[in-house]
Structures are given as structure tokens and as C-alpha cells.
Amino acid sequence: MEQPIAVTRQSFDDWMVPVYAPADFILVRGEGSQVWDQQGKSYIDFAGGIAVNALGHAHPVVTAALVEQAGKLWHLGNGYTNEPVLRLAKLLIDATFAEKVFFCNSGAEANEAALKLARKRALDNGNHSKNQIVAFNNAFHGRTLFTVSAGGQPKYSKDFAPLPGGITHTPFNDLAAAAEVINDNTCAVIVEPIQGEGGVLPADAAFLQGLRELCDRHDALLIFDEVQTGMGRTGDLYAYMQYGVVPDVLTTAKALGCGFPIGAMLTTDELAKTLSVGTHGTTYGGNPLATAVAGAVFSVINTPEVLEGVKQRHQWFLDGLNKINQQYPIFSEIRGGGLLIGCQLTKDYAGKAKQITQLANEEGVIALIAGPDVVRFTPSLVIPEQDVKEGLARFARAVARICS
Ligand SMILES: *Cc1c(COP(=O)(O)O)cnc(C)c1O
């Protein structure tokens, strides 16, 4: 065999479309919550590939499912169904409000399907002006043109105009403002139970409850974007279960495949009828390889052991982060749920989240940002206590450096 092509971080700048600015090292291997770079340096992974690697790296059950399916059947196309996709659909239906599932390959595609469903349903009901979508400032729903327009961060959409129309944004957690724009022409309201990319901002229970009532009053669909909060991230399988507010449509991706690309839109029998044969689709969605992996992921995550463990790990993080903050007061608030944790930087450290995560890398721990002023942690749901302790010790050294 030929030697593999030699690659370094410089290769990224040489060969890749520059939409990302990755760290200056290349990771080559992972096991549980530890990863190693080309030079063999170890890092504790508190980012989990941005809330994706919910069972860490190379989880034996997930790897076994992948390897087994890889030897059987990868892809068929939608003219033929398959066993793993049907099994995964049944698992999701039995565990949630949903009665029907549509599979795709990413969070954006799941949201795209949800928004298209909402528009078509109103049209099918003969209501030609009921096409308005209400979304929230700072929301993140993906990078396709429709989902980036539904998102509430103009910096991600403004350069791509003309954008799809009929989308109104109002302040998150402001029910009165939402009530002013939700009316009989609204076909859907889309909301994250905890805004992830927007800064780890949990919705108030009364806000989601109020949106539910407004949607019922105006016959609009309530879409929960649980792409980041889903699959055990907050300590329940989905965050809606904690809030006690049931959406009409729920989107899920990220942790669903633990790194294998897959997304899904969950909904009811009644609403599913909208997307009749030929009205929507995707080449890869629901292929046997992705759904076999996701089935294994689901079976591990949807257990009392893992879900209870998330609540315990939340406390380990809170205790450790509060201790760091007592010594070096840089956080004005530590918030979020389960293992979706955001640390808001004080005014003195505003804008320094990226710099802190870069120092953290140097100390051997991987953390995320959520905007310029929030350090975010989304580790594996099964991260061992020893890794939490070691990772926080390394993170404390990074914080000490920024404070000195
Ligand atoms: C990551 C994310 C998306 C987009 O998912 P992709 O798989 O990148 O398309 C959508 N919504 C939320 C809440 C997310 O966190």
C-alpha cells in the first residue's frame, strides 16, 4: 500500500474552504472522554464534538453496531425500507409523544422538514395566508437557507439574501412579545428549550407553556428544536419531558448518532399525513448504517442508569466550576441543564471565551464557546468522575493563566 498523504494543521489552510478556524493541532484517536493529537498529547474532552459524542469516543456497544451493520448493508435508497430504520422508529415512538418519524442526516435537515411540514399543512387545510413562522432572537436552527433564516442570529444569514420570507423573530423568554406576533396566520412557532449556540439560555417553563397555549389558540404547530438538548443531554431523554410541555413536532440529531450523521423529525399521526408520498425526501435519510448505529446509541442512553448519571455529573461540574469561580471570579453565572452547561463571563472577561478555550487546549482539555462571552461544556453523558476531576483541574490552570 502507498504511504498515506502527510498532513499537518497547515494543510487545512492550504486545501480547505476556510469556513472554520480549527485549533492548531490535529486529533487522531479517542477513547471514552479522552482524545490524543498527532504528537500523542492527551486531552480531556468536555466538548463531545459539540454535544454529539454523547457516549464518548469508540463506545464498545456503538462501535460493535457499526461494524456489524457495515458487513451487512449500508444503503438502499428510499424505494426499499430496512430493518434498522424501522426498529429505531419504534424505539423513538415508544419513548416519546411521537407516532411517526422522518429520518434525515442532520439537525438542519430535521428543522427544514418541520418547517416545510408546517407550511404545507396550513395550505392543505385551504389557508393560503397561514404561512408565517415565529422564531426567537439568538436562536440557532442550522445552516440551510431556510433554517439560517429561522435562526435569530443575523450574522449567519445576512450575507445570503434574498432570504425565505414570512419569518418573524421576537425576544426569547418574552411571552408578551410572542403573543403580539402569533396570530391566525402563524403556521408554526420554532423554539429551542435551551438555546445552545445562542449562549446556553434555558427557556422559562411559563414561556414554553404560554407558547403552547398560543399555538393551540391559533392552530399553529409548536416545533421544539431539540437537536442540542435531545437524547439525554439534560438528564431526560428530551427536554420537553422536564418542562411538561408537549410539542407537535420535535427535531433531534447531534447525539442521536453519537458522531454518525443522522437527524430525525418526530411528530403525530395526524400531522405526518401532510408529508405524503413524494412531497419531501432525502437520499441518505434512514439508511441502515446510520439507523443501526443510532439504535445502539438509543438503547444505551435511554436507560435510568445513563439518564440519572447525567444529573449526577451535572453536580460534579457545578461543584468544580463553582470552586474555580471562588478562586478566580470570572463567571457571573453558571447555567444550563444536565450536561449542557454555560458559564457567562463577567464584564472584565467579556469577549474572552475563545481565548480561554485556547488556553484550555494548551492545558489539555477541550471546551466550547457559545458566543464570545460564554464558555460551554457538553461532555459525554457517561464521562467518568476521574476525567471530570482531571479536566476541571486542567481547566482551572487555563483560568489561572487568563487571570494572571
Ligand atoms: C447544531 C444545531 C442545529 C444544526 O444541526 P446540524 O446537524 O449542524 O445541521 C440545529 N439546531 C440546534 C439547536 C443545534 O444545536
Image (tube, rainbow, N blue to C red):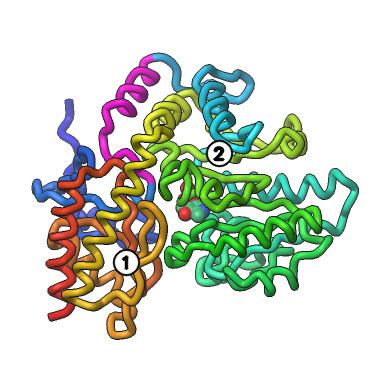
At which x and y percent is residue 344?
35, 72
Q: Residues within 10 Å of mark 1 (few under 14, many from 20)?
A: many
Residue at 40% across, 27% down: 296
At which x and y percent is residue 70?
37, 20
Left or right: 384 as drawn, with respect to 50: left
Instruction: Assess whether residue 267 is covered by the magenta stretch.
Output: no
Viewer-proximal residue, 347 or 107? 347
At which x and y percent is residue 235?
41, 46
Specify the quadrant of the image occupied by residue 124: top right
Disc 1 target residue: 375
Dot 2 amino acid type: Ala
Proximity of marks 2 and 1: CB atoms separated by less than 8 Å: no
The alpha-carbon separation of the residues under discs 2 and 1 comes to: 28 Å
Q: Is residue 200 above or below residue 233?
A: below
Q: Residues within 10 Å of mark 2 (few under 14, many from 20)?
A: many
Residue at 23% across, 72% down: 325
Residue at 67% across, 62% down: 210
Q: Quadrant of the C terminus?
A: bottom left
Q: Which mark is residue 264?
A: 2
Secondary structure beneath label 1: strand
Residue at 82% across, 61% down: 185
At which x and y percent is residue 109?
57, 45
Viewer-proximal residue, 403 or 215? 215
Specify the quadrant of the image occupied by residue 71: top left
Residue range corresponding to the magenta coloring: 52-71
Dot 1 amino acid type: Val
Left or right: 64 as drawn, with respect to 284: left
Specify the quadrant of the image occupied by residue 171: bottom right
Q: Is residue 34 visible?
A: yes
Q: Earlier in the sequence, mark 2 or mark 1?
A: 2
Q: Quadrant of the N terminus?
A: top left
Q: Is residue 159 visible?
A: no
